Amino acid sequence: MQPNRIDKGGRIDRSQPLRFRFNGRTYEGFAGDTLASALLANGVLLVGRSFKLHRPRGIVGAGAEEPNAIMQIGTGAEALPNRRATQVSLHDGLVARSTRGWPGLRFDVGAVNNLFSRVFAAGFYYKTFMYPQALWKYYERFIRRSAGFGKAPRKPDPDRYDHRNAHCDVLVAGAGPAGLMAALAAAKSGARVIIADDQPEFGGSLLASSQTIDNKAADEWLDDIVTELAQLDGVTMLNRSVVFGYHDHNFLTIAENRENHVRQRLWRVRARQVILAQGAFERPLVFCNNDRPGVMLASAVSTYINRYAVCPGKRAVVFTNNDSAYQAAIDLHGAGATVSAVVDSRMQGAGELAKAVEQAGIPVFHGHVVTDVTGQKRVSGVRIAKWNGDADSLVENTISIDCDLLAMSGGWNPAVHLHSQSGGKNVWDEELHCFVPGDAVQAEISVGAGIGQWSLSDCLRSGLEAGNEAAMRCDFATAEMVAPLANDAATQALQPLWRVPAAKDPDRCPKQFIDFQNDTSVTDIRLAVREGYRNVEHVKRYTALGFGTDQGKLGNINGMAVLAESLGEQIPAVGTTTFRPPYTPVSFGVCAGESIGDLYDPVRKTAIHEWHQSAGAAFENVGQWHRPWYFPRRGEDLHAAVARECLATRQSVGMLDASTLGKIDVQGKDAVEFLERIYTHNVGKMKNGRCAYGIMLGEDGMVMDDGVMARIGDNRFYLTTTTGGAANVMSWLESWLQTEWPELDVYLTSLTDHYSTIAVAGPNSRRLLQKVGCSIDLANEHFPFMTMQTAELAGVAVQLFRVSFSGELAFEVNVNSNYAQHMWQTLMDAGQEFDITPYGTETMHVLRAEKGFIIVGQDTDGSVTPVDLRMNWLLSRDKDFLGKRSLSRPDCLRDDRKQLVGLLPEDNKTVLPEGTQLIENPSATAPVPMCGHVSSSYMSACLGHPIALALVAGGHSRKDETIYASLADGSAIPVRIVSAVFYDQKNERQND
Amino acid sequence: MLLIKCPWCGERAETEFSCGGEAGITRPANPDSLTDAEWADYLFMRKNPRGAHAELWNHSLGCRRWFGVERDTVTYRIAKTCKLSPGKTD
């Protein structure tokens, strides 16, 4: 039933068969399989089409490096696009689809691209689709559909993700032989260790190894050390967990795949020491048609045989330039496959493993290369030829060998990604012919195959040494341990082979692929060089080398070698590209964690929120606050409700929850001196109990925040800030106190949440307060405008402020938030007699705009001075204050600065959209110069016509002039410049 | 993510802090006596060194104290952190 499954061996559980679907067909695998191994067991080799040329592609690798087997896993909202089949654990009922190939894998319309592959050379998209630009929108639609990896689900992800912060002494990335030894050594010293590995099982290469360690079979030794680690205190073992980011100051991120209610977890780990033991990736070889399904990495073939009991072919050829691939020949032979030949490009032959191969009767061709592959959707044979070591010597195809599997090895690339992410350089090793980690920049040690140690004994020893070293750096005493010994075979050195000679000129022969995922071939890199590209980063972008989701784990080094050859330089001179997080793709879900939906941002509600809700208020978000926007009655929309609320307030009494105002208590014997420096007005002249409207400027002279401030005592003030500016103003004041004026004796306390503020506004507001019972005389002569007093209102202690943001007779009631809803309800009940009307932020805005009161951040934008706002009267001449000097900078003295004015649309009915641009000449041709913009605009129910505030160049001297508002439909309507105060210009009502 | 040692709270993650830029900018005692150019120098001009940089940081999501940091702008290594000045801020 599984034609390629071997009868015994492997780490799969044959007693647990699992059914799964791939591209609509049902197959069976076993527990312990990956999707890739199960597909191979079923003889499914063709798993995708290539990105650009739509060539058929098969499984190449067995891990994170896999470029071709990119799958859509699952269906509906839970679907995961873009997963590597080699890293997806099989489970019963799994549904997978190839992400590329339309309408189907075996017949792909886009494959015609392959017929014209010479046209689709490097930079094809840049050259063809950029011009004419107007057509890009048509090109893009086509390109997007024919490219890409899978489809993002359209519905929200129903799964849960979370984040976890952790600290440890030693973090070990990778649980192969080196990583396990490092973790054991560190843990035995008493260090807190986290060891993470992307596989379901720890072991790395040991999971597929046929070697022995200390005379034990590798998997027995593995079971023992994993058991020992699990029993040690302070060890966290994370499987299915990839360390994908190495950030500053030894902060690392791990994405853990889980099988319980949390699907993935992001670990944010701060480690004192890091050991990088991520192993190495095998390098492919570059020859004609090296992308045909059935061409695989030799180590992947061994992994499928030894770990998953799957033999991917019946007749195999092995092509190598080093000793390691001989193991694949031995494993294939042992699994019952016929190995027709081992083709070794080295002239001098191989080490001990070669003897075992020859004893098995497998022919070995020294000094030969595979020049071409036959077969389309599956390898049917190879052509091999003798060569002389020169990639440009044309060769005759001398021998054809039939086979259905070609196992290749071009050597190994240490996984230097995390070292590079940590800020370390990678250096070319002339003996090993690969990049290895350079000096550590952070507290980090790289070990094992990750530094080019190819023998198991070396990996075990370097892991042990690194574990001890890391523990000592954390001041732990290390335990006595002896490095285990493995039965490593003696080897012969690798001979670099970056490009195999072809029967034809390399630019005319069948494609020699370097990056399978992006179809980057030798020709593309040579073309880029011919077109003048020199820098590896530029060539990378032009040819898309290493741009796939595999980030060039297989192809990058071969690509750089071909580039170096084309440039006539050495590989180290060409250099390597920079590795950035993530090491392998991570989901958006795990990045977001629980910070989605309602938990995306904290919500702040006032103490009176419940009342507003029960009254049916519509809410708006103001920063994190949810504030009542308006209180609609049955059938009312926003405009109707606001018109009613405005009229009711101006005619009788309205009430606003103003609790979101920032409130700061300032105390200390230098409070006056401090506030003199902060505010523009003369704070010292204020008598106790007086209120003042104050503005704060940045040192650049621009208005930063505004609000009423009150003097409560000789050394005590109460400041209010804008809702949005509350936190910033607090920080701003603190920064001056701490960094510039530490000698001042001043203490700041935020009272924003402690006090709730109820604004009672309208001609009946005094009567209402008197009705509920107020302990002080509210008459004008005893409690005049812009003063404050403490009092008892309806039996509750309050601070009463005679201030007005509506222009009406008004009081702001500051009450302990625990009493706020009680106070609000008491006033509402008592106010029935006056038809009291609760109003929201929209009515507040209309009322203040009718009076020309600004909102900082709406009518100002950080480029507006108090002079631009006609607030010269607030600027003290007698003292210095923050920003004062800037007001005399030449730019602040220009006559044509944008200045605050009122605007009346001459048609008396158009409510100008806020943000509308203002122009001088409606018939001018584009581009039309702008002379200002509308900052606030409302329909005024009290005045019966629309009003607007605007910032207009030189506006203060342009009263009664007509300019034009440019509307979105292209028309322009005339508007008249007027005073910014539309209502009660003599301020009689608020002073009443 | 940087690990920053607040002089009051100890080592904390960078997300608890905000950077206030170059340290040692002193507000002129008498701004009115400065030329526009001198005032602009105080207002706008900041060093942008490659290497060691003296900075002000605020433990904004912690104790809210400002303190000095000597940080390398290339390696991000923090040579030291310190309280600003003796006095009531201690």
Image (cartoon, coloured by chain):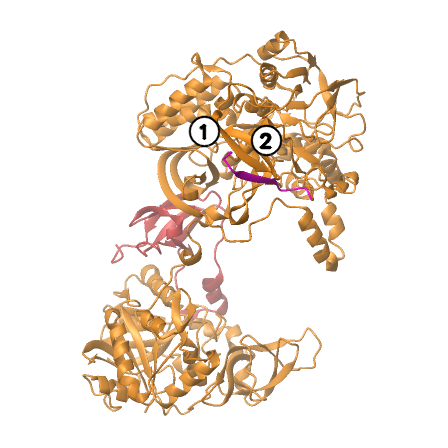
Chain colours: A orange, B red
Residue at label 2? A39
Quarter containing the C terminus of chain A? bottom left
Marks 1 & 2, CB-CB < 8 Å contact = no
| A136 w.r.t. A287: above or below | below
Local packing at callout 2 (Cα closer than 10 Å; few below 14, some 14-19, many 20+) is: many
Q: Residue furthest top?
A: A359
Local packing at callout 1 (Cα closer than 10 Å; few below 14, some 14-19, many 20+) is: some
* Residue A823 spot, x, y in % from top left: 25, 76
Q: Secondary structure at mark 1?
A: loop
Magenta segment range? A90-102
Name the residue: 33% across, 25% down.
A188
* Residue A367 spot, x, y in % from top left: 71, 15
| A616 w.r.t. B20: above or below | below
- Ranked by sequence position, the earlier of labels 1 and 2 is 2
**Label 1 is placed on what type of residue?**
Glu
Residue at label 1? A201
